[in-house]
Amino acid sequence: MRPRYKGTRKEVRALGAFVALQRAAESVLGSTQSEIDRTGLTHSQFGVLEALLHLGPLCAKDLARKILRSKGNLTLVVENLEKAGLVARTRREDDRRVLTVELTAKGRRLVGGMFPRHAAGIARAFEILTEKEQEE
């Protein structure tokens, strides 16, 4: 499809690359969504659980940065995970202003059980690329 935007060649090329990248990302997210959907989690909730599984307890600021969400958006995500018994929030002893988020045993079982299937799904989605292309 020819671009409708009549900018410079550099702009049109960059916009085309951006759209292609966006479509590729949506395709990969779509292919992994069914595994996440079975748990009733959102992508953001899964991202929080996955980060905590691999990195351990994190303060809200670091967690938001890790999952590419704003701290404000993260608050609701973490509240819902806490209501479901998947994470716990505690105040740090040395600085009561800082909330630390960590997995509960239930959260660890859930994300630990599903992450291998999630990783395998991502690997399948990327099989169309060579190893070199994946590393670039």
Image: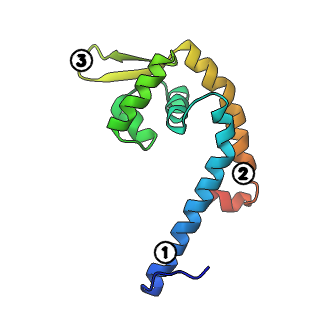
Res 96 label: 3
Q: Amino acid at mark 3?
A: Arg
Does the CB distance between marks 3 and 1 fall below 8 Å? Answer: no
SS at badge 2: helix
- Split into 4 quadrants, where in the image is the N terminus? bottom right
Q: Along the horizontal axis of the image, is 70 left or right of 110?
A: left
User: Mark 1 to mark 2: distance in Å?
Assistant: 24 Å
Q: Position of residue 46 (x, y in %)?
A: 55, 33
Instruction: Please name the amino acid that badge 2 sits on.
Output: Ala
* Alpha carbon separation for disc pair 2 and 3: 43 Å
Q: Amino acid at mark 1?
A: Ala
What SS does tag 1 mark?
helix
Element assignment for label 3: loop
Which mark, residue 14? 1
Q: Are marks 1 and 2 in contact (CB under 8 Å)?
A: no
Q: Label 2: which residue? A: 125
Quadrant of the image containing the C terminus: bottom right
